[in-house]
Image: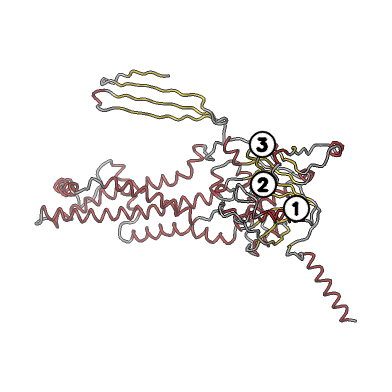
Amino acid sequence: MMSSMRRLGFICWILTASKLIGIDGALGSQNSEEAYVTLLYGEEFLLGIRVLGKSIRDSGSTKDMVALVSDGVSDYAKQLLQADGWIVKTISLLENPNQIRPMRFWGVYTKLKIFDMIDYKKVVYLDADTIVVKNIEDLFKCQKFCANLKHSERLNSGVMVVEPSEKVFKDMSSKINTMYSYTGGDQGFLNSYFPDFANARLFNPQASPEELKSRPIPQMERLSTIYNADVGLYMLANKWMVDEKELRVIHYTLGPLKPWEWWTHWLVKPVDVWQNARIELEETLPGTGGGQNPNEDLLVKFLILLPLAFFVFSYCHSSLQTRPLIDHIRHLYYNLRSGGVLGYPSVTASTINSNQQFPNAALGKLPTFLGAISVVVCFMATLVSLALSFSIVPRQVMPWTGLLLVYEWTFTVFFLLFGSYLNIIHQWGIYVAHQSSFLSHPESSEYDSGKGHVRQLSSCNVATWYYGLGMASFALAIPLLPCFLGITALFLRSNGQFELKLLLHACQMPSEGCLDFVIQVRFDGSSRHCIGIGYDLCFTTPCNESISKRH
């Protein structure tokens, strides 16, 4: 009897576990006949799905949220989505048959599996790069298949309403390898599979039940732009195609400008909505609050501290060979206060005058191409520094963290690269100067070299510290420039006006007069149209008399 009871209890436990986990590999249980669905086939989109789920719940919906997760996604990602309230269903990838396609489209055909979710009567599919800004429960009133027209007669598969059907899914599966896709992905396939979609009637969520009964049930309906507001089209016009207050779903369609990339926040205004939702993400697993990734936190801290540690080490190393920093600052202070020559006791005015031949000899050997080479090296060091900084900074950190990390590493790498180049030039200059001094005055080269070194050290210290203080001030000012200038995005965020000026200055000989030609172009920030063009023509005579003409 006890054995039978234990066996019965074990069977009940298995049944309960299978209900919670799902026989098909699902994590979580079904609670409604309608659901929101998204697809995760790469962990790059994990943060996007987390924000999407929060936005759906914030809109007041209590329907199921189902994440179709492909093979290869980590168990940690599945656990995180489940902790956020998603029902996680593991599915196998549908291979993309198109050889010519964007790299990011390698798994998008898996999206077609939403047509096979026959456990639900109706599902609303949302891409991982969308966010819900208002309640969209009325989408479940849409019949059969619904999507939004984006580009002329083409539908966009980022937001769709689907009535799952095993028959339709099998028919689609049989045509995947033969049906043309103009995008090389699922969107192009769906446009070919529903060729008459452009003629579908517009979905009207306000239609009365009597009106709906009086018409035949449509096989397809078109969604309004408010259910799939394309950020790409926003960037083209610098405004939404409809009233911003009416938007329900924002879709971040641009490939390199996804909202979770830290740099996108500084380029496109609508990303603010996404970032605000990200900040409010709860810590459903340790270290995940605010959209943080605990695996990247250690790397971020390391990237912040390493340049600082390098500069501290460099200063400590140099202070052992030269005077402490406070002595340099005190020396500069007294020099600026006195307004005279730096008071190095071992160097006098007569010494400087008597040693004038040292720099002259060196200057005679100065290559004419050194300035051009230095400019090229400077630009190359800047480009390499920026490229390296962008490559090592995690892409999904917070916008300010990403900006400051790139800024910090760009300056650090630039100082290392260009500083190394300057050190090579410095050592080469010392060698050439010593060679020139020895050939000109072999009997006094040692004595003059010593005096020249002290004199050059005094002037070099002044130039070096002025340069260092200037660069430090410039470095601190750069992150504050957007605040001072009111620039918070590359694409216009205000309705103000701005003006471009082009100055052409022609002056062969000052004694013959000069000609200034200024072109002014004014733009309107809201319409992005030119609202005025003018020019100023000014001729300055040798007697400094100006003759102007303005238009």
**Snapshot colouring:** secondary structure
Q: Which secondary structure, mark 2? A: helix
Marks 2, 3: nearer the viewer: 2
Residue 547, position as x, y percentages in the image? 33, 18
What is the three-letter code of the residue carrying label 3? Glu
Residue 380 visible from this viewpoint: yes
The C terminus: image quadrant: top left
Question: Pointer 3: what residue?
Answer: 244
> At x 66% / y 39%, what residue is drawn?
153
Q: Which mark is residue 168?
A: 1
Image location of residue 245, percent across then percent down: 69, 36
- In the displayed structure, 42 sits above or below 150; it is below
Q: Earlier in the sequence, mark 2 or mark 3?
A: 2
Q: Is residue 233 above or below residue 454?
A: above
Check contact, mark 1 vs mark 2: CB within 8 A.
no
Instruction: Mark 1 or mark 2: name the one nearer the start of the chain.
Output: 1
Which residue reaches farthest left? 443
- Alpha carbon distance from label 1 to label 2: 14 Å
Q: Amino acid at mark 2?
A: Ser
Mark 3 is surrounded, within 10 Å at the Cα level, by few (under 14), some (14 to 19) or many (20 or more) other residues, namely few
- The residue wearing badge 2 is 192
The answer to which image quadrant residue 513 occupies is top left
**Circle 2 crowding by C-alpha within 10 Å: few under 14, some 14–19, many from 20:** some
Q: Nearer the viewer, residue 161 or 215?
A: 215
Q: Nearer the viewer, residue 235 or 496?
A: 235
437 relative to 529, above or below:
below
Q: Name the residue rendered at 88%, 79% in the picture.
A: 4
